[in-house]
């Protein structure tokens, strides 16, 4: 049996020491198959970026294992580890911070192409750089080769980041809030470009976003994984999560979608959180960490036991023994 492309097994990540220590990611397990598109969603600070950075090999785990094509990335020899680091690329939220301001687009693309043997010589690397600029819809490509990051718009910079990631022919891309900083008007064209890469380059995606409407758009054929305060609280096929969310937190996230998306908002979900405040990672509530905000919390159960993710027949799994079997009540508006 082919192993998943990438797998997290009971991965935990702690930052800091002593009383200041926080557990940003708490014992999560996740399998992503080759060709899948998975969206990791949740509010700011729930551990999405930390998870993505660990998967890209940019942060060590505190405990647990990350397996790439079935092999623990910490047991790889130098050559295989380098191959893993090339295979997994990350696209950050802020392309301005991740692009070197002193380099032209030509340098940013030609250098990795030559360094990683993706082109035989300089002219081959330039040809490939031009092709990649066209792939990311920066045309006419020649006009962009000598530009510096500050001469590009936010959307164009993000396209250069994507082209740069593609120079090493990755199999897995972590797109961390990759379209959040660009204007809404060009968000869709960026998303469409990323979607095209799934097919054209056979890339598997982990798309990290706080916005369920984006997750729905990007991963309708894929899966949504919902994180809350470092834990996975629900996961499943996107259509099921969007139309029939079971965890009260997922329901609250959906109810908060501001976009005029008729599929997300034509029926209002009946959920009124007890508190809008997210607890601090420094003082996590016992039991289910969502219980102080949850309208369905059962005293003696939810404030005591940490719920496990359990599969549900409709697809995916839910970490809420109280609500997992209950479709939400909807009211027509
Ligand atoms: N290098 C670090 N040192 C200390 N704490 C960190 C570090 N990186 C992240 N954290 C903490 O870990 C928690 C999770 O952060 P993370 O960036 O993974 O969340 P997120 O869901 O991606 O949120 P955002 O969308 O705001 O980036 C936060 O409380 C954050 O302050």
Image: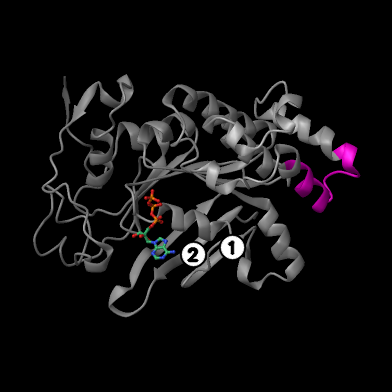
- Say whether residue 276 is visible: yes
* Mark 1 crowdedness (10 Å alpha carbons): few <14, some 14-19, many ≥20: some
Compared to residue 254, the image places residue 63 above or below, namely: below
* Image quarter of the N terminus: bottom right
In which quadrant of the rendered view does residue 24 lie? bottom left
Report the residue marked by disc 1.
67
Question: Residue at 40% of width from left, 70% of height from top?
Answer: 14
Numbered disc 1: secondary structure: strand
- Say whether residue 116 is visible: no
Which label's residue is closer to the chain start, 2 or 1?
2
Report the residue marked by disc 2.
9
Q: Main secondary structure of the magenta part?
A: helix
* Residue 102 in picture, x, y percent from top left: 66, 46
Q: Is residue 226 left or right of residue 291?
A: right
* Image quarter of the C terminus: top left
Pointers 2 and 1 in contact (CB under 8 A)?
Answer: yes
* Residue 192 in picture, x, y percent from top left: 55, 26
Compared to residue 52, the image places residue 333 above or below, namely: above
* Mark 2 crowdedness (10 Å alpha carbons): few <14, some 14-19, many ≥20: some
Quadrant containing ligand 1: bottom left
Asked whether residue 161 is drawn in magenta, I would say no
Q: Is residue 251 left or right of residue 46?
A: left
Q: Is residue 71 left or right of residue 7?
A: right
Q: Indicate yes or no: mark 2 CB to ligand 1 under 8 Å.
A: no
In which quadrant of the rendered view does residue 28 lie? bottom left
**View extreme (left): residue:** 299
Q: Which mark is residue 95?
A: none
Asked whether residue 120 is drawn in magenta, I would say yes
Magenta residues span: 109-124
């Amino acid at each position: 049996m082919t192993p998943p492309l990438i797998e997290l097994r009971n991965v935990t990540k702690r930052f800091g020491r002593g009383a200041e220590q926080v557990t940003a990611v708490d014992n999560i397990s996740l399998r992503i198959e080759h060709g899948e598109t998975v969206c990791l969603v949740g509010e700011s600070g729930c551990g999405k970026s930390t998870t993505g950075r660990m998967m890209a090999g940019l942060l060590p785990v505190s405990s647990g294992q990350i397996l790439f094509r079935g092999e623990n990335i910490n047991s790889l020899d130098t050559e295989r580890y380098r191959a893993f680091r090339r295979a997994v690329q990350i696209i950050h939220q802020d392309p301005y911070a991740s692009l070197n301001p002193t380099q032209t687009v030509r340098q940013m693309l030609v250098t990795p192409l030559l360094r990683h043997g993706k082109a035989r010589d300089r002219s081959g690397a330039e040809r490939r750089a031009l092709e990649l600029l066209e792939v990311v819809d920066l045309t006419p490509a020649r006009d962009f080769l000598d530009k510096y990051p500050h001469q590009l718009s936010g959307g164009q910079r993000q396209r250069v980041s994507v082209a740069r990631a593609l120079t090493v022919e990755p199999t897995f891309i972590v797109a961390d809030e990759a379209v959040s900083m660009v204007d809404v008007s060009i968000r869709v064209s960026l998303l469409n470009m990323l979607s095209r890469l799934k097919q054209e380059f056979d890339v598997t995606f982990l798309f990290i976003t706080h916005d369920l409407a984006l997750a729905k758009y990007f991963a309708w054929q894929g899966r949504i994984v919902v994180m809350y305060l470092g834990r996975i609280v629900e996961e499943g096929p996107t259509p099921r999560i969007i139309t029939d969310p079971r965890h009260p937190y997922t329901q609250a996230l959906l109810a908060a979608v501001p976009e005029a998306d008729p599929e997300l908002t034509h029926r209002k979900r009946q959920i009124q959180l007890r508190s809008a405040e997210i607890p601090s990672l420094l003082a996590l509530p016992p039991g289910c960490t969502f219980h102080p905000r949850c309208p369905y919390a059962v005293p003696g159960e939810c404030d005591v036991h940490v719920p496990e993710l359990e599969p549900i027949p409709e697809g995916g799994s839910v970490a809420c023994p109280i609500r997992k079997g209950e479709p939400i009540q909807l009211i027509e508006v």
